Amino acid sequence: MAEAPISLTPAPRARVQAMQEYHPPLGGRDAMRLDFNENTVACSPKVREVLAQISAGSLTRYPERGPVEAVVAARLGLRAEQVVLTNGVDEAIHVLFETFLDTGDELLLPRPTYAMYEIYASATGARVIAVQAGDDLQFPFERLSSAISPRTKLIAIANPNNPSGLIATRAQLLELLRRAPQAVFFVDEAYFHFCGETVMDLVGALPNLVVARTFSKAYGLAGLRLGLLAGPTELMRWVRRVLSPYSVNSLALACLPPALDDTAYLDWYVSEVLAARSEFEAAVDAAGVRRWPSRANFILIEIGARHAEFVQRMRAAGVLVRDRSSDPGCDGRVRITIGTREQMRQAAAALNETLAALRIGSEAQ
């Protein structure tokens, strides 16, 4: 007699089952891409030259990140052992949290902020202590300070913050760091190039400061997935123990040095975005729509109850924007990436047409 087939399905850990799912709306992005804060033009021409020279034989070898980490570290004024390259900043966050958070620990962060902090922390068994910003979305320094406890093991600050574009001052960051010497103090500087504010110069001088940077934004390498963590040698030693030795692929490693070398291209793109941001903010103000004063390559605007329809109509007009209404404290708010001046003039025209159709802002008067 044949045995009945086994129908049990293996179950993941309870903490994985409880994790929030994250589904970025990446499908059908064939319009102007102002929804994911990417470089809206291209990577450096020097990167494209390197890509054209990569041989098929070179792809048969495992990637070696050490030499490129040394190049990056030298650019940052750090030692090679203080820098870890990662598969985007997402992997940097994931590995950092897996290294230092455990059951019973507390992760302290402001809210709203980048969603992956809470998602990655939830898999570790740590408790997330999220401090909600006010309606102005300013950095909640005093409330964060009050929330520090002996169980605080890691503090995560995106600076500038996403989705608001606002910043915490250097003095605020250093005071929080001083008040939590037992915690890893993580500053995510993904949008550093568009604001110039940094604490990277303090890496190594402070025993618990870890800084992240990405090459997905200003450098235009989002498709290659490149990020980094910089911190004290001792902390990075533990991170390397958790990190996969081959998670950064050889194409990304080959392209990073020429991207760093082409400072003229980087400076051009950043200056173009900053000029476009100023112009577009003026257009938003003229339209009578509330916005937040961003220091990043995006702005957050107040649309209100018709936010979903606004996003759909902008897509129909050929412009993709990101509805952030599901973020805590952001109901009715939409984030718009800043591209070049030419792109943002087109976006402003679509914005005005959409606002007029929905009778929002000055069009509602």
Image (tube, rainbow, N blue to C red):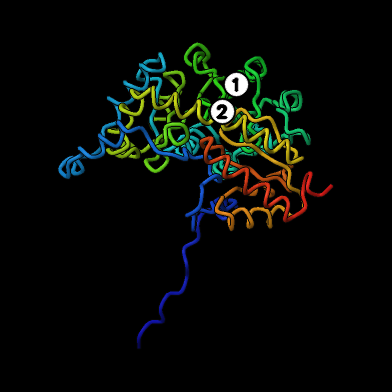
- Which residue occupies the extreme right position in the image? 365
Query: Callout 2 environment at 10 Å: few (<14), some (14 to 19), or many (20+)?
Result: some
Q: Position of residue 19 (x, y in %)?
A: 58, 51
Tag 1–tag 2 contact (CB < 8 Å): no
Secondary element at image label 1: loop
Residue under the image location 70 percent in, 27 percent down = 139
Instruction: Tell which residue pokes out farthest to the top in this image.
Output: 205
Nearer the observer, disc 1 or disc 2?
2
Q: Is residue 149 visible?
A: yes
Q: Quadrant of the N terminus?
A: bottom left
Instruction: Please state which of residues 322 and 121 is positioned toward the viewer in this rendering.
Output: 322
Residue 335 position within the rendered picture, expressed as x and y whole percent measured from the top left: 63, 42
Reading the image, the residue beneath label 1 is 182
Q: Residues within 10 Å of mark 1 (few under 14, many from 20)?
A: some
Q: Nearer the viewer, residue 73 or 266?
A: 266
Q: Is residue 311 left or right of residue 239?
A: right
Q: Quadrant of residue 248?
A: top left
Cα separation between marks 1 and 2: 42 Å
First in sequence, mark 1 or 2: give its number. 1
Tell me, for residue 275, which label it has, or none.
2
Position of residue 213 relative to residue 178, above or below, is: below
Q: Position of residue 364 (x, y in %)?
A: 81, 49
Q: Residue at x 73, y 52 (%)?
A: 356
Which residue: 41% across, 81% down? 4
Residue type (three-letter) at the residue carrying disc 1: Gln
Near-viewer residue (42 or 22) = 42
